[in-house]
Amino acid sequence: MEPVNILLDQLREIARATIEMFPHIVVAFVILLLTVGLSKAATFSVRRVLARTKLRQSLKELFTLLMSILVWVIGLMIAAVIVFPGLTPASILAGLGLGSVAIGFAFKDVFENFLAGIIILFRREMRIGDFIECEGIEGEVDQIAIRESHIRQTDGQLVIVPNSILFKNPVIIRTDQPVRRMTVTCGVAYDVDVDDARDVIRRAVEACESVDQDNKPIQIFAQEFGDSSINFEVTWWTGSKPVEVRESRDQVVSKVKRALDDAGIEIPFPYRTLTFKEPLPLLRGTAPAEDQG
């Protein structure tokens, strides 16, 4: 019977301790309910304040999340101290510090992307709607989240890129400026006057609606002596979006080709001159015997 008595004594002690702690548990529960209300009120206030600013939407959501986390941490610490009077805020913070180190090692990549996302959100160079290229990924920035960014490629596919990749690698922002310089090479035959060909090409490029001629000049340079042509480097400025670039290149190439044809200027095919060491015999007037019969 001795073990049974020991067990009963232990149960009585547990029951007595529970009854003694019940008021503390009720107060801690009330604290948690207040924390829920304060968290909603704090996030609502932060949203109202940030709505008047020009911060990015993702950055506003980050500040709202951090405010909610701060309120919950304070509320949980107060509730823990009430339930367990032996705890102190210093001991709780020390425990959180040790735990955060272990969690940091376990979720290193997650925290790396998180911090990179915060830095990217504060940057003004890369915005929603920009066309970028990074590590072979090219497309429109559809969303910048805390951990990853969404890049919509020109073929419609969505690529989710960890923010650490965008932070640690060079990023080309193609739409940072409203216009972008384009270049094509156009060759003319060697018997064509270079100045006449340059004027024809210039007039053709100037006739293109997609070419920006207000602030940026059209530049046409005789570039090199090619194998069968004199090659011109034709440079102009157009819209920076990919579809604007393709449309402008199509217009320029079409109008330059038509203008050179109308002016009688040849865009030559590659010419090849073959030289043989020995003269080649020419066979004329001979046919196979079966064809003569």
Image (cartoon, rainbow, N blue to C red):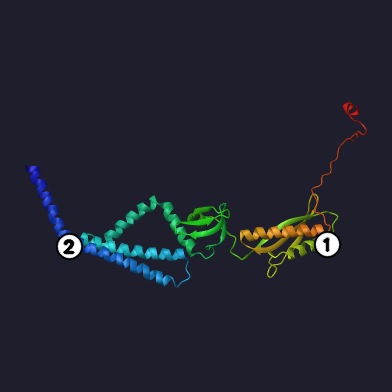
The residue located at (27%, 59%) in the rendering is 91
Kind of residue indicated by mark 2? Pro
| Residue type of the residue flagged with mark 1 | Asp
Within 10 Å of the Cα at label 1, are there few (<14), some (14-19), or many (20+) other Cα atoms?
Answer: few
Label 2: which secondary element:
helix
Name above or below for residue 286 compared with residue 237.
above
Whether the residues at callouts 2 and 1 have beta carbons within 8 Å, the answer is: no
Residue 164 lies, with reference to residue 273, above or below; the image says: below
Q: Which residue is situated farthest in the right direction here? A: 285
Question: Which quarter of the picture shows residue 204?
Answer: bottom right
Structural distance between the alpha carbons of marks 2 and 1: 98 Å
Residue identified by numbered label 2: 23
Does 6 appear above or below 197?
A: above
Outermost residue, left direction? 1
Q: In this view, does 112 lie to the left or right of 256?
A: left
Q: Earlier in the sequence, mark 2 or mark 1?
A: 2
Residue drawn at point x = 40 percent, y = 69 percent: 47
Estimate the x, y position of residue 34 in percent, counting from the top left.
27, 66
Q: Mark 1 points at which residue?
A: 196
Residue 244, horizontal then vertical, whole percent: 64, 61
Residue that appears at 12% across and 53% down: 13
Which residue is farthest front?
293
| Quadrant hosting residue 95 | bottom left
Decide if residue 84 is in sight here: no
Query: Where residue 245 appears, x then y in whole percent?
Result: 65, 59
